[in-house]
Image: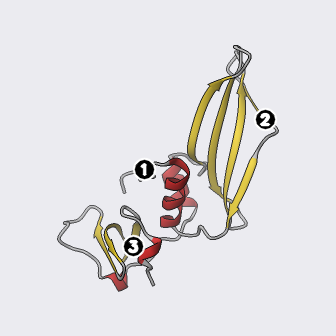
Amino acid sequence: MIQSNELRLGNLLSYNSNIYVVSSLSKNKVEAEPIGQAKSSSAAYFKLEYIPLDEDWMKLLAGNETGYLTISSLERTSDSSDIIVLSTIECYLHEDGFLRVCAYEYDKQPNGSTEISDDVITLGYRHVIYLHQLQNLYFVLSGEELTIPDL
């Protein structure tokens, strides 16, 4: 059953194979409107379902076939004017069911090639199994809403 305290406005849910976006929340009530349909129709709270996070969703959100979703990216110059350090936080679904969130640093050489540094931080989130949970995690880590391509 949907728990309103787990959701934020804009989270995606499903009902009857249609995607709904959360438009209103209160302690015991969730209102959601269908995407691509008239706003006058809405799903009853008890009929809404969480959307399982899978590889297809990760590829859609990442906008690529790898399914690696970039949460943040930062370029900064190093002490050496020849090298630019690229820092990224990316996430992907691992085959063991964990959502992996990795922080990487790359050294960008003058010729354009990149070399990953030895400092890679990897976190696994077993509890992130639904799309709305990824939307919430993305917001916490980036301070921005996760862009959902046109459905």
Q: Evaluate if marks 2 and 1 touch, with contact meaning CB atoms under 8 Å apart.
A: no
Residue 122 numbered mark, or none = none
What secondary structure is marked by label 3?
strand
Q: Earlier in the sequence, mark 1 or mark 3?
A: 3
Residue drawn at 59 percent across, 33 percent down: 74
> Mark 3 packing: few (<14 Cα in 10 Å), some, or many (20+)?
some
Q: Earlier in the sequence, mark 2 or mark 3?
A: 3
Percent position (x, y) of residue 53? 54, 66
Residue 5 seen: yes
Distance from disc 2 to disc 1, alpha carbons, whole Å, reads 29 Å
- Quadrant including the N terminus: bottom left
- Residue that carries the numbered disc 1 in the rendered image: 147
Residue nearer the viewer, 140 or 11: 140
What secondary structure is marked by label 1?
loop
Residue 17 seen: no
Residue drawn at 49 percent across, 61 percent down: 136
Q: How is the image coloured?
A: secondary structure
Q: Residue 45 appears in which quarter of the rendering?
A: bottom left
Q: Amino acid at mark 2?
A: Ser
Residue nearer the viewer, 20 or 146: 146
The outermost residue toward the front is: 27
Q: Quick check: 100 above or below 132?
A: above
- Quadrant including the C terminus: bottom left
Residue nearer the viewer, 68 or 85: 85
Q: Residue 3 appears in which quarter of the rendering?
A: bottom left
- Residue that carries the numbered disc 3 in the rendered image: 14
Q: Amino acid at mark 3?
A: Ser
Front of the two marks 2 and 3 = 2
Front of the two marks 1 and 3 = 1
Distance from disc 2 to disc 3, alpha carbons, whole Å, reads 41 Å
Percent position (x, y) of residue 61? 49, 52
Residue 117 numbered mark, or none = 2
